[in-house]
Image (tube, grey):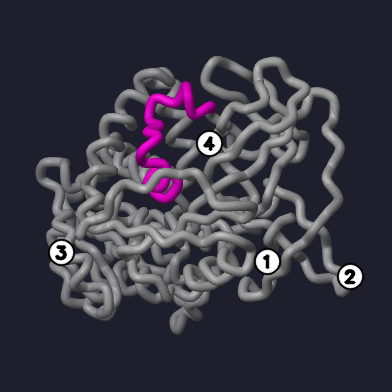
Amino acid sequence: MQLEVDRGDLHRTRVTDHEARALPAGGARLRIDSFALTSNNVTYAAFGDALGYWNFFAATEGSDGTRWGCIPVWGFAEVVESDVADVAVGRRVYGFWPMATELVVEPGRCDARGFHDLAAHRRPMASAYNRYLFVDADPVHDADREAQHMVLWPLFFTSFLIDDFLGDAGCFGATTVIVSSASSKTAIAAAWLLAERDGVRVVGLTSQRNREFVASLGCYDVAATSDEVATLAETDAVFIDVAGNADVRGAVHARLGDRLRSSMIVGGTHWNHEAVSVAPPVGPRPQFFFAPAQSAKRTQDWGQARLDERVGAAWRRFSRWTDGWLHFDTASGFAAVERAYLDHLDGRLDPRTASVCALRRASGFAVASEPG
């Protein structure tokens, strides 16, 4: 069974119950136990066609011609059937899943830490999304913090690569980094990493509702509302667009012009915003930031072990820091998960809250103690 959405109307959902697929030779069946839902998953849906996120997991076309899709999520699963010696039944795995109860994969490129799904339809996609890690061999896995891992790790890794990309480029000569959708967890992680750099000033753009929360985090030097862009200091800056709001992006470009040294589009938390202005922004051309490309570069530059070491050290500091403000809600069963998805889609959740989900049964993930 899996939860699918109408690619043309992301508010329409359905649950499909297909007959279990027979395990092919060289295949493995994984029972999906738990996963996270965040605004990152809304970005996957919003950019599903442009960036190929709909291509990872199959959905059946509706009899009325509706193009259904399955939004990818990050979480944990257990191998329950396998025709691959290196992928043993009973091992727990972390990776990229459909919102479903199981997934049949074709494991290949196996090593001590995990494997890749080499199914033909996934081979054209970025390798980082096809990699599955055995939790007992994952250096960043902590059995007591699996909820944090599901919710934050994919976002943090993206943010680590954003910070690394900017550091590698000398921040394009800028001393200020402006981040939109500043209350989102991807933005917070990026701001936290950037705040560790000497001489970098981080400005967060957010809604009036979330301004106090953003200011309280301590990783932003300035917390401003999106309609205050015209009051920002005119200085050399970089823009990290997590909102995907063309009007906010246009306002930042208009305010800074050629003093804006780089403009990267990272997410689409404002996926349903209808732009008022269609004029192209002044200054640099906005570019999509594709995290797997920077990951591949650093793997080549440093080697996998060194990359893992650097990310892991930063991750452990960040994960502990979030204990001061992050809370978890759990959603069990298709109806509850659908409600959680729609809450994220419409931006109804408090930014302090994260959703951990289980479709099949009560999940076994661990949640660290929440702040009082």
In the rendered view, tell whether residue 280 sits above or below residue 265.
below
> Mark 2 vs mark 4: which is more N-terminal?
2
Is the residue under label 2 in contact with that under label 1 (CB below 8 Å)? no
> Amino acid under label 4?
Tyr
Please rate how many residues cluster around mark 4, counting C-alpha atoms within 10 Å: few if below 14, some from 14 to 19, many from 20.
Answer: many
Q: Magenta residues: mostly which secondary structure?
A: helix
Examine the structure image and report whether residue 142 is included in the region drawn in magenta. Answer: yes
3D distance between C-alphas at marks 4 and 1: 24 Å
Residue hosting label 4: 94
Residue 336 lies, in percent from the top left, at: 56, 67
> Mark 1 vs mark 2: which is more N-terminal?
1
Classify the position of the C terminus by image quarter: bottom left
3D distance between C-alphas at marks 3 and 4: 32 Å
Examine the structure image and report whether residue 88 is included in the region drawn in magenta. Answer: no
The structure residue drawn at horizontal position 37% and vertical position 58%, both measured from the top left corner, is 328
The structure residue drawn at horizontal position 61% and vertical position 25%, both measured from the top left corner, is 115
Residue hosting label 1: 5
Mark 3 residue element: helix
3D distance between C-alphas at marks 2 and 4: 34 Å
Q: For this view, does 36 lie left or right of residue 170?
A: right
Mark 2 residue element: loop
Residue 259 lies, in percent from the top left, at: 23, 59
Classify the position of the N terminus by image quarter: bottom right
Residue hosting label 3: 216
